[in-house]
Image: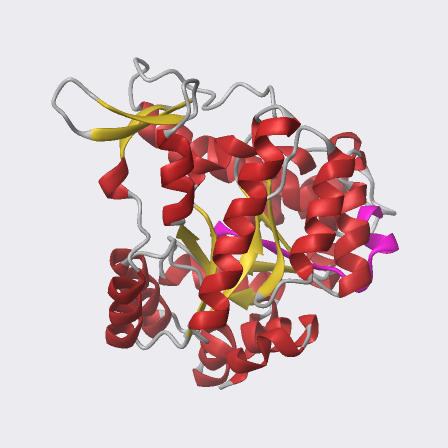
């Protein structure tokens, strides 16, 4: 398996956040436990993950040949800080990730970017892509909820297009966005934020990128969206129905989704959802994602084993599609073909 969705927290970033006096920062709570204080509250630092040998052992147990590392969600808050704070921290993350890629040939990485200043973000993306092992950047889904939103992200797409790099669009806020949307004292807040809102937001991203001409200017950029691109495999039949009723001369959404050069990963989904995604997108557009956890890897492997998609499609999803994506970025990713 090549794992295209494996979150990481560099140890160097932890030390930098311990030294900060404003959030995001790391402090000890009343119980003496180190926690990251961020926009989503407090999260024990021990839950984050930067033990390379532990991760490599897990990869060996699970048959993962390559992990593409990206910054763990709660720590992405560094990208929303003023540029004088966010740029040095993002550079630290990207240098640390590249260092891992150089030392251990089983890693590639997505860069973190200072999103408060799109010019600075594009410049850091350009710099990071020159680092060994960096194959793209992770950016928040809120930047692509509508085509109007996505206009602001064009500088990053231009960099990706020049370098034939990957833009990994992950559910998350832009600087200044309210996040999470549902307050913690709401019933089922975790289900509402972690599934309902996440999947609906990713569906909106897919509509922007697949049902408009936004990506036409970036034929060499590779776009990767997690969690099967939201709920599109289950909603597309209704989209087609409404299209036939409302705009019968328009190309059906199902056709446009299938034609679009957007990859999705199957993180967190089961066999029936994977079957629906293969039916809609085609197996050649799906890659593996695990969130970088043992549970996620077990879940994904089991789902793919049970999905009735055929061995050729299963191999494409487990390895072939991701290997081809990484190879396109350049020689820095050639080890991913092994």
Q: Residue at x 32, y 77 (%)?
A: 63
Residue 333 place in picture, x, y as percent: 59, 75
Q: Is residue 233 visible?
A: no
Looking at the rendered structure, the number of numbered marks drawn on it comes to 0
> On the rendered structure, is 174 left or right of 213?
left
Residue 331 position in % (x across, y down): 65, 79
Q: How is the image coloured?
A: secondary structure
Q: Residue at x 33, y 74 (%)?
A: 305
Q: Position of residue 35 (x, y in %)?
A: 27, 29
Q: Is residue 221 magenta?
A: yes
Q: Nearer the viewer, residue 242 or 170?
A: 170
Please indicate whether residue 200 sits to the left or right of residue 165 in the image: left
Residue plotted at (73% across, 37% down): 120
Q: Say if 133 sits above or below 122 in the image.
A: below
Residue extending furthest left? 31
Residue sticking out furthest to the top: 185
Image-based side of 33 in relation to 299, left or right: left
Residue 278 seen from this side: yes
Question: Is 32 drawn above or below residue 209 in the view shown?
Answer: above
Q: Nearer the viewer, residue 22 or 323?
A: 22
Question: Residue 42 is drawn in which quadrant?
Answer: top left
Q: Which residues are magenta?
A: 213-227
The quarter of the image holding the N terminus is bottom left
Residue 70 position in % (x across, y down)? 49, 52
Residue drawn at x 65%, y 55% is: 128
Taking the magenta stretch, the answer to whether it contains residue 138 is: no
The front one of 101 and 297 is 101
């Amino acid at each position: 398996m090549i794992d295209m969705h494996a979150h990481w927290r560099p140890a160097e970033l932890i030390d930098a956040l311990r030294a900060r006096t404003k959030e995001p920062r790391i402090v000890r709570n009343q119980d003496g436990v180190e926690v990251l204080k961020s926009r989503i509250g407090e999260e024990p630092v021990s839950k984050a993950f930067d033990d390379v040998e532990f991760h490599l052992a897990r990869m060996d147990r699970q048959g993962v040949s390559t992990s593409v590392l990206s910054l763990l969600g709660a720590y992405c808050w560094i990208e929303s800080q003023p540029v004088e704070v966010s740029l040095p921290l993002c550079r630290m993350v990207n240098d640390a990730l590249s260092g891992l890629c150089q030392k251990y040939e089983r890693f590639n990485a997505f860069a973190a970017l200072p999103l408060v200043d799109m010019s600075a973000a594009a410049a850091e993306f350009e710099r990071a892509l020159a680092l060994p092992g960096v194959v793209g950047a992770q950016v928040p889904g809120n930047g692509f909820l509508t085509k109007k939103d996505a206009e602001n992200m064009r500088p990053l797409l231009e960099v990706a297009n020049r370098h034939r790099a990957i833009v990994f669009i992950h559910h998350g806020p832009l600087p200044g966005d309210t996040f999470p949307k549902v307050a913690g004292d709401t019933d089922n807040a975790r289900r509402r934020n972690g599934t309902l809102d996440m999947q609906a937001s990713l569906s909106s991203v897919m509509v922007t990128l697949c049902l408009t001409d936004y990506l036409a200017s970036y034929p060499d950029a590779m776009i990767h969206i997690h969690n099967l691109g939201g709920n599109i495999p289950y909603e597309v039949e209704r989209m087609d129905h409404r299209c036939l009723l409302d705009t019968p001369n328009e190309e059906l959404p199902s056709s446009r989704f299938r034609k679009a050069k957007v990859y999705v990963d199957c993180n967190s989904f089961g066999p029936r959802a994977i079957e629906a995604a293969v039916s809609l997108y085609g197996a050649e557009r799906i890659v593996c994602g695990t969130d970088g956890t043992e549970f996620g890897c077990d879940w994904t492997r089991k789902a793919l084993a049970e999905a009735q998609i055929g061995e050729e499609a299963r191999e494409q999803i487990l390895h072939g599609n991701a290997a081809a994506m990484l190879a396109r970025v350049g020689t820095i990713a050639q080890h991913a073909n092994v």
